[in-house]
Image (tube, helix red, strand yellow):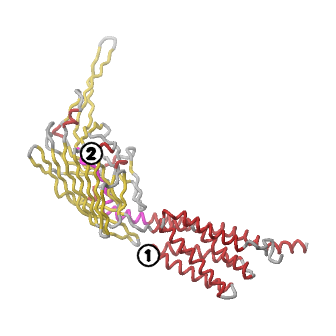
Amino acid sequence: MDEKKMQVKKFTQGYTFKMLFLAFLILTLLIPLVMVGALIDERSKTADSAEAEVMEAWGSELVAAGPVIAIPGVRTERVRTTTKDEEKVDIIRKPFTLMITPQKLNIGADFKTETRKRGIFSVPLFYGDLAISGIFDPTQALASLLPNEEVSLDKAELIISLSSQKGIRKIDQAVWSAEGDDVTLFFQPGNRGQDFGGQIKSLDSRHKYSFIRGSESKSARTGGIHAMLPELAADAKANFNIAITIHGGRLVRFLPLGQDTHADITTDWPSPSFQGSFLPSGSNIKDNGFDATWDINYLSRDIPLHWKSESGYRDYSDALFGVNFFRAIDTYSLNTRAVKYAILFLIVPFLTLFLFEVLTKKRIHPVPYLLSGIANIIFYLLLLSLSEQMQFYLAYLISALAIIIMLTLYSRALLPSWNKSWYMGLVTTVSYVLLYAVLNAESYALLVGSVWAFIVVALVMFLTRKLNWYGSDE
């Protein structure tokens, strides 16, 4: 019995047991790391909610499509039914809407930006002028009508679809010019069911967006404005010139409905992120803002020049183009990426203490290992909480310095002299410097992380190559 106790004691005091225990400890500490990751997600959703409240009051994201001409029409069909005694002919009249896109569409957006806060959370907003001009030529569309189809040219409407008309502050100009006459249009709210660009469904600060499709309720597809047009001439072109003062935030999207679409976006926001199906043909990005230009021909997108819409809804969300008002430092995505590499930074201090134990021949109790692991987890909590209050690099510096100093002083209490204990501070410092490099070099994050892991494992293998894993006294 005494011999078995001695064997058990000898095994528990050996390095093999210590390594197995450290592996168990690392797996155990993954539980609080998962909780930290969940906390980051929760804070991110709280930020999204706060930003959504600001956006709701200000005017939401700007997604615009149009203008298009909508002309109500009727298709007459004769349905013949035959019975034993007689032949009956029923005349059925089916309504439809003839949609006509511009021959030329020019979009100009000149916005100023500002950042509004709700508590500790902020959202980039813009305000300024949206100018839409161009030419309509209804000749081809009207020529496409079948003999049994007729339209009411005196009931034509001009429709501009918007993700939300709440951002409209005023319409500075709305002029329709046809056959030498200029008419001022009177716009009313609503898009007559023609929501060409879809509606933004979710406000996502990670610069992602999704659209409500045709299966959603009609109430979700009413954003926009419309105006009655003077009676159209079947063979005459018409010019339009519309200027709107509008508010919005975070992103701008347009739908290239014109046969030839030209768009210019100018703002004082220094860090744009061009998104959508079409990148700008030219852009100029400076420290005090940017301007970008798009030229899109109808052959490059799957949108007809005219069509007959009986359902009142077609979804062309995939053809949108525009820009996000990108924030160069996304606090929550950086925190999430930091936690993904956390397991490596749990292993490094454990291995450092283990090598101290091997090289100094001084036993270190499992509790110091546990405390050093908890200290590294606290780093991620500090980083999250401080980065919400200040710039990310400063929050990272403060959090890293606090943990480095704490672990260095603690290792001095465990080891006999500063000659050994300062290595803990050096190793921890190098680890946090490499982590910061990984966070700021997204394209090379995997390369830096894998090389660092290789170096750590190679160093441990070299230093322990002659170690007696069965017991320190053999």
Gap between marks 2 and 1, in whole Å?
45 Å
Q: Nearer the viewer, residue 460 or 309?
A: 460
Q: Which residue is mark 2?
A: 192
Residue that extends furthest to the top in the rendered view of this protein: 85
Image x and y of residue 216, in percent: 39, 46
Q: Is residue 381 left or right of residue 423?
A: left
Residue drawn at x 54%, y 72% as measured from the top left: 434
70 lies above or below 207: above
- Per the rendered image, the range of residues in magenta is 47-68
Q: Secondary structure at mark 2?
A: loop
Q: Is residue 1 visible?
A: yes
Residue that extends furthest to the left in the rendered view of this protein: 180
Q: Is residue 171 left or right of residue 362?
A: left
Q: Nearer the viewer, residue 162 or 446?
A: 446
Q: Amino acid at mark 2?
A: Arg
Image x and y of residue 394, in percent: 46, 77
Q: Quadrant of residue 4?
A: bottom right
Query: Decide: marks 2, 1 in contact (CB < 8 A)?
Result: no
Q: Which residue is mark 1?
A: 389
